């Protein structure tokens, strides 16, 4: 709907109730209007108090606070309090007002006007770089966002999903009302991130390095990579491939240098931890980069990784999704897991327990990650409301290795 609403001239209201447009409560909408001329009650769009009273073509006005107040015989402030400050009224009076509002089809003061009056939208934005549908098909992202939503909902805060791309002239990161925003694994140069920064909203970064003065929630990625590498080294593997991601590439390809493979704080951290342990042990290390951790790219990348005459005896993967693709590619090539090839995932998502064989993987705590992110957002909002300077926090969540059946001794 267009933000500008056309108005029509109306005769002056009859004496009695408060004049049209007077707002008695900060929570009342600034567009609330009194009864229509002649004293007939107004109606909410799509609902009428008594449709039979309307002559053909007679326009239907809106049900307002004043309409409900007239029905009950109280002030507009009292009606507003019934919706927004119930502790200010007796239970009996509030029930009477809500019953009258329900009969008239009135659902409460306009949320946009209430948010403007409070200076708060009651929602935080969550910014994705991929499509929202893609994010929620990712079991790792879905588990994190579930924990985040639970942590925020306990405090009455809603989540607004912000796609990175714009739709026509609408740019969600610029145009949507929110009290703070979470930036989830987005490139720092993304235009949507820049809009959030320019709006000076409190921000929390997840799975990416934050700019100065911004809170973040990260995993201990390097330790995760090191744990995976030390595990396969202890099993005797010395020809190891790292299977990671590089969205800067136009497609899938072998990395020029395994030590610098991967792009972004998550991929680089996991590669750094693994490569340091493998190199120190004198292992032969290669790295293959999929364009992204996505089913559109990963299966072909996994096949290419195992296509050589001397495939690795162990593969350390960026994610469980990529590890599952390696197991499938190995099966297609006639390689047995773990007898011929050991495979390690990362995340310990639901997928890790449904592959055959079940995945050895590095576990991250999705619940802790989501709740820490929610706490950081709520703390940032509270400081803004209190007029206090930002106090950014950097949270780093520990990880652990979970050994299952996809790893075994190196083949002889």
Image (tube, grey):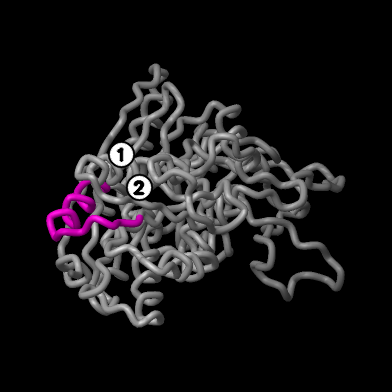
What percent of the width, then of the height, locates residue 124?
A: 47, 43
Find disc 2 in the rendering and name its residue. 152
What percent of the width, then of the height, locates residue 271?
A: 35, 45
Q: Which residues are magenta?
A: 225-241
* Disc 1: CA contacts within 10 A as few (<14), some (14-19) or many (>=20): some
Taking 316 as reference, is 224 above or below it?
Answer: above
Residue at the location (74% across, 71% down)? Answer: 53
Does the magenta portion include 42?
A: no
What percent of the width, then of the height, locates residue 304?
A: 48, 67
Residue at the location (36% across, 54% down)? Answer: 242
Compare marks 2 and 1 and give the one earlier in the sequence.
2
Judging depth in this view, the residue of 218 and 95 nearest the camera is 218
- Which mark is on residue 375? 1
Taking 266 as reference, is 409 above or below it?
Answer: below
Confirm whether residue 206 shows in the render: no
The secondary element bearing badge 2 is classed as helix
Judging depth in this view, the residue of 55 and 163 nearest the camera is 163
Q: Is residue 295 rendered to the left or right of residue 372? A: right
The alpha-carbon separation of the residues under discs 2 and 1 comes to 8 Å
Judging depth in this view, the residue of 357 and 45 nearest the camera is 357
């Amino acid at each position: 709907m267009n933000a500008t609403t056309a108005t029509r001239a109306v005769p002056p209201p009859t004496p009695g109730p408060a004049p049209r447009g007077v707002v008695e409560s900060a929570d009342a909408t600034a567009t609330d209007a009194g009864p229509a001329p002649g004293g007939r009650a107004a109606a909410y769009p799509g609902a009428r108090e008594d449709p039979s009273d309307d002559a053909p073509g007679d326009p239907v006005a809106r049900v307002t606070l004043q309409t409900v107040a007239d029905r009950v015989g109280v002030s507009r402030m009292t009606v507003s309090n019934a919706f927004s400050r119930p502790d200010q009224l007796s239970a009996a009076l509030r029930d009477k007002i809500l019953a009258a509002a329900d009969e008239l089809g009135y659902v409460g003061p306009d949320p946009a006007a209430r948010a403007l009056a409070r200076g708060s939208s009651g929602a935080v934005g969550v910014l994705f770089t991929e499509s929202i549908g893609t994010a929620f098909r990712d079991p790792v992202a879905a588990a994190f966002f579930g924990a985040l939503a639970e942590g925020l909902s306990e405090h009455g805060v809603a989540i607004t999903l912000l796609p990175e791309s714009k739709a026509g002239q609408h740019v969600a990161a610029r145009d949507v009302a929110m009290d703070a925003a979470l930036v989830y694994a987005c490139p720092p140069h993304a235009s949507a991130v820049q809009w959030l920064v320019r709006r000076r909203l409190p921000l929390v970064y997840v799975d990416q390095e934050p700019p100065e003065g911004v809170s973040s929630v990260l995993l201990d990625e390097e330790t995760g990579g090191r744990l995976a590498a030390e595990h396969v080294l202890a099993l005797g593997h010395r020809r190891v491939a790292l299977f990671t991601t590089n969205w800067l590439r136009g497609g899938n390809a072998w990395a020029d240098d395994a030590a610098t493979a991967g792009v972004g704080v998550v991929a680089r951290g996991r590669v750094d931890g693994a490569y340091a342990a493998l190199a120190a042990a004198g292992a032969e290390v290669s790295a293959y980069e999929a364009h992204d951790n996505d089913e559109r790219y990963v299966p072909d990348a996994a096949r290419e990784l195992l296509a050589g005459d001397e495939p690795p005896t162990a593969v350390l993967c960026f994610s469980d999704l990529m590890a599952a693709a390696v197991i499938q590619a190995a099966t297609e090539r006639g390689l047995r897991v773990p007898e011929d090839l050991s495979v390690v995932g990362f995340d310990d998502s639901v997928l890790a327990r449904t592959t055959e064989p079940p995945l050895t993987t590095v576990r991250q705590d999705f619940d802790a990650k989501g709740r820490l992110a929610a706490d950081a957002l709520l703390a940032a909002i509270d400081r803004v409301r209190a007029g206090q300077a930002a106090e950014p926090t950097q949270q780093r969540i520990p990880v652990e290795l979970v050994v299952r059946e996809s790893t075994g001794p190196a083949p002889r």
